[in-house]
Amino acid sequence: MGIAMPGDSERWRCTGCGNLTRFDVTRTVRSEDFVHQDLAGRGLVEERSVLTETVERVRCRWCGATDSVEIVPRPDADGSAADASAESTTGRA
Ligand SMILES: [Zn+2]
């Protein structure tokens, strides 16, 4: 039932309709944020470090299925770009 964020050499794919690109992701993120407030008190998160992240649901944007998304290898993952072998489950900053 649970599904993880795709690693560096992986991607999501909907087995129902073949969608590879559009997903609605519900996730719980525990993060440490650098909040920068200006002198008027308005705050802005300028840096975010994801400490833990749990994907609760991935819904296919095309067909709406919530139980048909699987992890598949990226097409170029076994080529020359495979030297990034560290598993990364964090999003981009
Ligand atoms: Zn789908």
Image (spheres, rainbow, N blue to C red):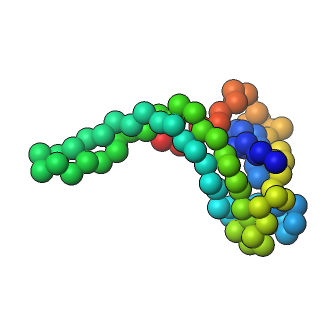
Q: How many marks?
A: 0
Q: Is residue 68 left or right of residue 50?
A: right
In front here: 49 or 87?
49
Q: Residue at x 16, y 48 (%)?
A: 41
Residue 84: x and y in percent read: 69, 30
In front here: 4 or 9?
4
26 over 88 or under it: above or below: below
Q: From this viewpoint, which residue is outermost toward the right? A: 15
Asked if one can make out residue 74 in the rendered structure from this viewpoint, the answer is: no
* Figure quadrant of residue 8: top right
Asked if one can make out residue 7 in the rendered structure from this viewpoint, the answer is: yes
16 over 49 or under it: above or below: below
In front here: 65 or 81?
65
* Figure quadrant of residue 64: bottom right
Residue 19: x and y in percent read: 78, 65
In front here: 86 or 61?
61
Q: Residue at x 58, y 45 (%)?
A: 28
44 over 68 or under it: above or below: above
Residue 75: x and y in percent read: 82, 49
Q: From this viewpoint, which residue is outermost toward the left? A: 39
Q: From this viewpoint, which residue is outermost toward the bottom? A: 63
Q: Residue at x 77, y 52 (%)?
A: 12
* Figure quadrant of residue 36: top left
Q: Residue at x 84, y 59 (%)?
A: 68
Residue 34: x and y in percent read: 34, 36
